[in-house]
């Protein structure tokens, strides 16, 4: 970084690098493989000149992900958002879909991109996921599906949600953007519902820079999804649906293969950070750590805390204190999706309907967690709290 400062930079990328203060701690930072280890993969791409359209790295990554995650059928995507939009298309979802306001805005945006009306239902105060006890009251003759989120990688109450879906003939599409590698008693959490959609964005526990995937129950559904992510092409001369371009490139797929090699080590480091935070915060009045919610294998993707009324500072004062100390914690998820302008007019967005989500959204702070976060940095964060 010091060398960069001596260069008279007109290069915008270098200018951005210069602005990154070395002492700043971000809420997350990607773990990248050794650059030298990536060169042989790039050589293969340069040699074959196969850059995209389901090339060899794409096929290999799909296979490796099935093994690693414990799922049977997977379709890679350019990102999770296009995956969500395509999942809704694949199941021909229309009308109204029940979803959570406590998520990243892409969850509900994928509904609007399909002309579907989101119906927000409040969340459970322990899991921060869609509260199954409140779903039935929101079902109308127009409801066709439920789109829950495994928020922070903590599993939804998948059995309760499935039983409601079965009673009313609804589809279930999980936004599993946070749930890479998460398992419950029966295996991968990604095997629940009709489809689950992962994100491999730079901020996620497994990243291909940008990327995502849909977990499918069978090969026929996967094939339809593959048509849809490739403009609807079934073969050279046949377009079966108004598809989109959702394909992952060979560059991203090759990177994914390399990233998988370091995943277990990354997870172990995340687990140690999670434990250090929990030990350090155990006696702090007014700070509540979120507990696991039924997973047998966690991915330690996030470390949310709630700043409760008996803490001496308000949530936003603590947030500003962090910022003043160059610690970029984030208030995920504040504001709620239902508070954004394109959603706040919906009847289900009315604040009394979403009182639990509102309270958590006003108390939450996600602390930094990523494999290379050092113990002394965790201690610096703990001292500030
Ligand atoms: C819950 C959730 N859904 C969807 C997305 C969108 O994922 P992507 O950036 O891969 O499109 C994200 C975050 O990036 C997310 O946190």
Image (tube, rainbow, N blue to C red):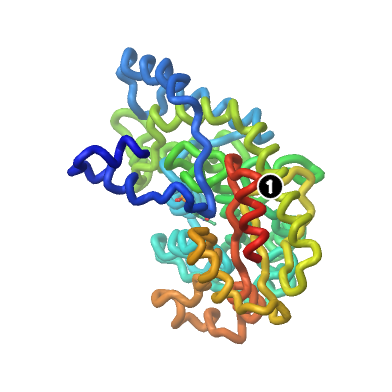
Relative side of 27 to 217, left or right: left
In front: 43, or 226? 43
Q: Residues within 10 Å of mark 1 (few under 14, many from 20)?
A: many
From the viewer's perspective, is residue 318 above or below residue 12? below
Nearer-the-camera pick, 165 or 85: 85
Q: Which quarter of the figure is the N terminus placed in?
A: top left
Q: Compared to 245, does 62 lie above or below?
A: above
- Residue occupying the point 57% across, 26% down: 63
| Horizontal arrangement in the rendering, residue 345 relative to residue 292 (left or right) | left
How far across and how far down the image is residue 37, in percent?
Answer: 47, 20
Mark 1 = which residue? 273
* Residue in the picture at 66% in, 45% down: 375
Is residue 139 in view from this perspective?
Answer: no
Kindly tell me whether residue 236 is visible in this rendering. yes
> Quarter-wise, where is residue 119 in the image?
bottom right
* Nearer to me, 259 or 376: 376
> Residue at the top extreme?
47
Q: Answer above or below: position of 36 versus 200.
A: above
- Residue 357 in the image: state x and y as whole percent: 62, 74
Q: Quadrant of the C terminus?
A: bottom right
Q: Is mark 1 within 8 Å of ligand 1?
A: no
Q: Residue at x 49, y 54 (%)?
A: 88
Left or right, 368 with reference to 19: right
- Residue 206 % position (x, y): 55, 39
* Element under disc 1: helix
Q: Residue at x 59, y 34 (%)?
A: 73
């Amino acid at each position: 970084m010091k060398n960069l400062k001596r260069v008279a930079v007109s290069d915008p990328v270098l200018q951005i690098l210069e602005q990154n203060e070395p002492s700043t701690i971000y809420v997350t930072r990607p773990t990248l493989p050794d650059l030298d280890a990536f060169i042989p993969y790039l050589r293969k791409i340069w040699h074959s000149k196969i850059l995209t359209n389901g090339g060899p790295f794409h096929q290999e990554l799909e296979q490796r992900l099935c093994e690693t995650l414990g799922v049977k059928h997977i379709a890679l995507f350019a990102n999770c958002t296009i995956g969500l939009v395509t999942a809704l298309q694949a199941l021909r979802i229309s009308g109204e879909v029940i979803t959570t306001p406590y998520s990243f805005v892409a969850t509900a945006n994928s509904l609007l991109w399909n002309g579907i009306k989101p119906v927000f239902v409040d969340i459970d105060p322990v899991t921060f996921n869609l509260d199954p006890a409140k779903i039935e009251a929101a079902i109308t003759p127009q409801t066709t599906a439920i789109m829950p989120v495994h928020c922070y990688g903590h599993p939804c109450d998948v059995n309760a949600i499935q039983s409601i879906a079965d009673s009313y003939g609804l589809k279930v599409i999980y936004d599993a953007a946070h749930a890479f590698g998460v398992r419950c008693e029966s295996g991968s959490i990604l095997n629940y519902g009709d489809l689950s959609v992962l994100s491999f964005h730079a901020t996620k526990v497994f990243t291909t820079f940008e990327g995502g995937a849909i977990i499918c129950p069978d090969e026929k559904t996967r094939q339809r999804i593959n048509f849809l992510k490739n403009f609807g092409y079934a073969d050279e001369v046949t377009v079966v649906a108004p598809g989109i371009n959702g394909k992952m490139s060979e560059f991203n797929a090759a990177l994914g293969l390399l990233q998988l090699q370091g995943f277990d080590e990354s997870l172990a480091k995340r687990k140690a950070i999670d434990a250090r935070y929990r030990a350090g915060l155990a006696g702090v009045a007014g700070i509540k750590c979120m507990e696991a919610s039924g997973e047998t294998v966690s991915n330690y993707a996030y470390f949310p805390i709630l700043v409760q009324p008996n803490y001496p500072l308000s949530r936003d004062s603590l947030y500003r204190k962090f910022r003043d100390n160059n610690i970029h914690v984030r208030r995920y998820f504040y504001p709620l999706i239902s508070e954004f302008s394109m959603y706040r007019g919906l009847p289900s967005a009315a604040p009394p309907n979403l009182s639990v989500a509102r309270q958590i959204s006003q108390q939450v702070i996600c602390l930094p967690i990523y494999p290379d976060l050092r113990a002394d940095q965790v201690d610096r964060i703990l001292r500030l709290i």
